[in-house]
Amino acid sequence: MAGLACARHLADAGQDVIVLDKGRGLGGRLATRRSEYGAFDHGAQYITARNPGFAAWLDQAELASSAAPWQQLGVDRTWWVGTPGMSRIVAPLAEGLDVRKACRVEAVRSNAPGWTVACEGDEIVQADHLAIAIPAPQAATLLAGVTPLADGLDVVRYAPCWTLMVALAEPLETAPRVYRASDGPCAWIACDSSKPGRAADGENWVIQAGPGWSEIHLEDSSDTVSRLLHDAFESWAGALPDIRSSQVHRWRYARVLKALDAPCLWDGEAGIGLAGDWCLGPRVEAAYLSGRALAGRMLATQSR
Ligand SMILES: Cc1cc2nc3c(=O)[nH]c(=O)nc-3n(C[C@H](O)[C@H](O)[C@H](O)COP(=O)(O)OP(=O)(O)OC[C@H]3O[C@@H](n4cnc5c(N)ncnc54)[C@H](O)[C@@H]3O)c2cc1C
């Protein structure tokens, strides 16, 4: 979200932009895992908007059919989801851009002026300016010795998250569609199939462990975590119908616990900057605002 929000803003201002992403699809932690029994949102679950600019952007995404409100009783803010999966919500930002997927950046070198970016598989990209929008610990590794901006990133803290995805042959008739707790193995349980635009003939559920539980079990095997999360889900739901498929995913850097408290980082002399949720807080909205802020700083430097 941060990288594409930045790229979109730059492109709309007439700049030539190239986006590199190591993922096979776009979205990063706005992630959708496809399976033969339908898709699962295994990263961000829903999006809220506090900032009017971001709220307006979500309205645009709804018009482009890549987002829709997910109605919930008793919540004071609209919950937005991507349609037909969370990863689709970034699609309008990427439209018309030169986006290179499955392109892992392995090294960044200064040519003063300008930059060389080396990707896995020998792809080399030259650029006048660089915007890096990846989690802070990964940025710190990639940019160590490249820019002093990388030196202060260790103040940022993340919580991990273990996620279980279960496809059930039959619906869980009596279970609530969403359950939340502050921590434990089931800090979030949601019927993914109850989100708008999802197609599944059974029911797909996503169970996310809380930050403390995920930290304790961070290095456990997938098999162990899968068993523990299954047991916890079953204690919550009661006896489960036939399970058609089940998988777990570990997010090492899931939600920001401590942010930088600055919209972005930018070195106008060197022409390099950083953005991401970790600049402002643990939400998709923060990533969007950070990416936009970095684009604004880049454009302001150019117009000087
Ligand atoms: C389990 C979970 C649940 C969450 N729930 C919510 C929620 O309900 N609501 C909410 O608002 N937020 C939620 N979040 C947080 C939200 O997903 C993030 O705040 C937001 O998506 C971060 O966006 P970003 O652009 O900063 O980073 P990312 O989404 O991490 O994007 C970074 C991008 O950089 C790419 N990348 C990384 N390294 C390289 C490299 N070397 N070369 C090339 N590309 C690279 C990645 O592929 C990725 O696309 C959740 C996150 C997780 C993991």
Image: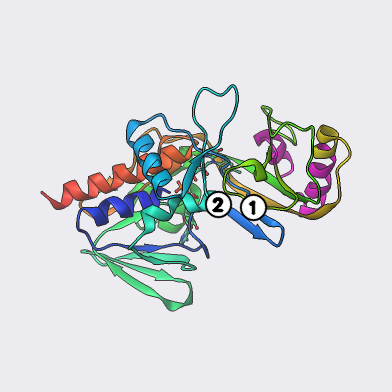
Circle on res. 199: 1
- Look at the numbered discs 2 and 1 and tell me whether their residues touch, using CB distance below 8 Å: yes
- Direction bottom: furthest residue: 122
**Residue topped by disc 2:** 84
Decide: few, some or many residues near mark 2? Use Cα within 10 Å; few <14, some 14-19, many ≥20: many
Please, is residue 221 above or below residue 99 in the view? above
Where is residue 184 drawn, in percent x and y?
Answer: 73, 32
Q: Is residue 48 above or below residue 300?
A: above
- Dot 1, how many residues are within 10 Å of its Cα: few (below 14), some (14-19), or many (20+)? some
What amino acid is labelled 1 in the image?
Answer: Ala
Above-or-below relation of 74 to 260: above
The image position of residue 151, as x and y in percent, is 40, 46
**Residue 11 drawn at (x, y percent):** 26, 57
Instruction: Tell which of 213 and 46 is nearer to you.
Output: 46
Q: Which residues are magenta?
A: 207-232
Q: Is residue 230 magenta?
A: yes
Name the mark on residue 219. Answer: none
In the foreground, 235 or 271: 235
Asked whether 255 or 247 is in front, the reply is 247
Residue 231 drawn in magenta: yes
Q: Position of residue 167 (x, y in %)?
A: 75, 51
At 65% across and 35% down in the image, what residue appears?
211
Q: Amino acid at mark 2?
A: Pro
In the image, is 111 to the left or to the right of 81? left
Classify residue 114 as left or right of residue 184: left
Nearer the observer, 239 or 126: 239
